[in-house]
Amino acid sequence: MELELKNISVTLSNKKILRSINLKVENGEFISLLGASGCGKTTMLKTIAGIINQSEGSVILGGNVADNIPAHKRNTVIVFQDFRLFPHMTVAENISFPLKMRGINKSERRRKAIDLLKKVKLEGYEDRHVDEISGGQMQRVALARALAADPIVLLLDEPFSSLDINLRKDMRELVLELQKEYKITTILVTHDQEEALTMSHRIAFMHNGQIEQYDTPENIFRNPVNTVVADYFSEGTYINGEIVNNKFVSELFSSSVNKENGKYKCLVRPSAVKVKKYNNGDFIIIDKVYQGNNYLLKLNNTNNNLKLESIVPYPTDIVEEDRVNIELEKDKLIFIPEK
């Protein structure tokens, strides 16, 4: 189902939470709402579902304005991070609850629940109670219950945040597998950059109740529109300079770049910095941090005190106090216009 938000603003307790949000999600698309806590992600999700009423604008589902449709009739289902399962019910009863609300008979409800348990890889768990299964299994039950409602839009509110790293990976793969199978328009709320980058067709990056950038994972990472977006994905060092006639010029370096004339900040991420040991190098290694498959090197320019970072593979013979020269990988440099 296609979803569109037009000029959505939300005010709660006299505080504006969302500010003129415009967002369009295509039928069957998977998008992420990404940003720090308090930026308005969950409020947007609840507004789409009809749990919170907007003060301005419209929610449009399948080309039809849904503003006057109550939450229980919108057929948009939220999976919350705290699962919200019924403790007095069995797994099958939890999953089939939306069907019970529709008046579906008991045998058909159970058949559907068992079928969905197979989909979420919990076959044989139908008669267990909620207190007899793990947190990861609860998350799968909550997902199965959402699918039982046959939603036109599936809304996921940080559903993996309480799971350990291995379970998160398994659940991400399961959600993507089911989303593709059912072709459900899906919106994921997350503050996890990797989650958004690896799962989404597009990412809406939010800050202070607004969407700063709505783009593909590749573009939002490689072409952030401002430093707020850029810093969320990867920290680095900003070099001030100017682009004139497709050439960026700064005190540190110059580089050909196909962008409009003007003043820019060039973000130099660690992945863009290559180092080579050299006795009279301009940079000195001031710290070396082991990261498993690689090291993060912290560099200081002995001439102007400029600090950079570089990632080098394990193993390396570079150590603290070594002098090095650097080479910048031009295709990994990020140029952000100053406003």
Image (spheres, rainbow, N blue to C red):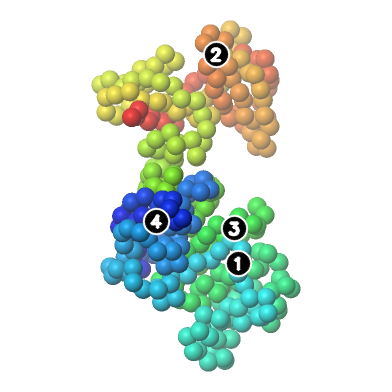
Which of the two discs, 4 and 3, labels the residue nearer the N terminus?
Answer: 4
Q: Point out residue 84 in the picture as x, y percentages from the top left corner.
A: 60, 69
Point out which mark residue 83 bears: 1
Taking the image as shown, residue 122 lies to the left or right of residue 157, namely right
- Secondary element under disc 3, as helix, strand or loop, is loop
Question: What separation in Å lies between label 3 and label 1 (alpha carbons)?
Answer: 10 Å
Point out which mark residue 10 bears: 4
Which of the two discs, 4 and 1, labels the residue nearer the N terminus?
Answer: 4
In this view, the residue farthest toward the right is 132
Q: Nearer the viewer, residue 312 or 195?
A: 195
Q: What residue appears at the point 64 percent right and 30 percent down from the top-left corner?
A: 295
Taking the image as shown, residue 170 lies to the left or right of residue 43, namely right
Circle 3 crowding by C-alpha within 10 Å: few under 14, some 14–19, many from 20: many
Which of the two discs, 2 and 1, labels the residue nearer the N terminus?
Answer: 1
What amino acid type is highlighted by mark number 3? Phe
Query: Which one is in front in this view, the residue at disc 2 or the one at disc 4?
Result: 4
What amino acid type is highlighted by mark number 2? Asn
Q: Point out residue 55 in the picture as x, y percentages from the top left corner.
A: 35, 59
What amino acid type is highlighted by mark number 4? Val
Question: What separation in Å lies between label 4 and label 3 (alpha carbons)?
Answer: 26 Å
Q: Which residue is mark 2?
A: 305
Q: Which residue is mark 3?
A: 160
Q: What residue appears at the point 60 percent right and 78 percent down from the top-left corner?
A: 94
Q: Please tell me how many numbered marks the rendered image carries.
A: 4
- Secondary element under disc 2, as helix, strand or loop, is loop
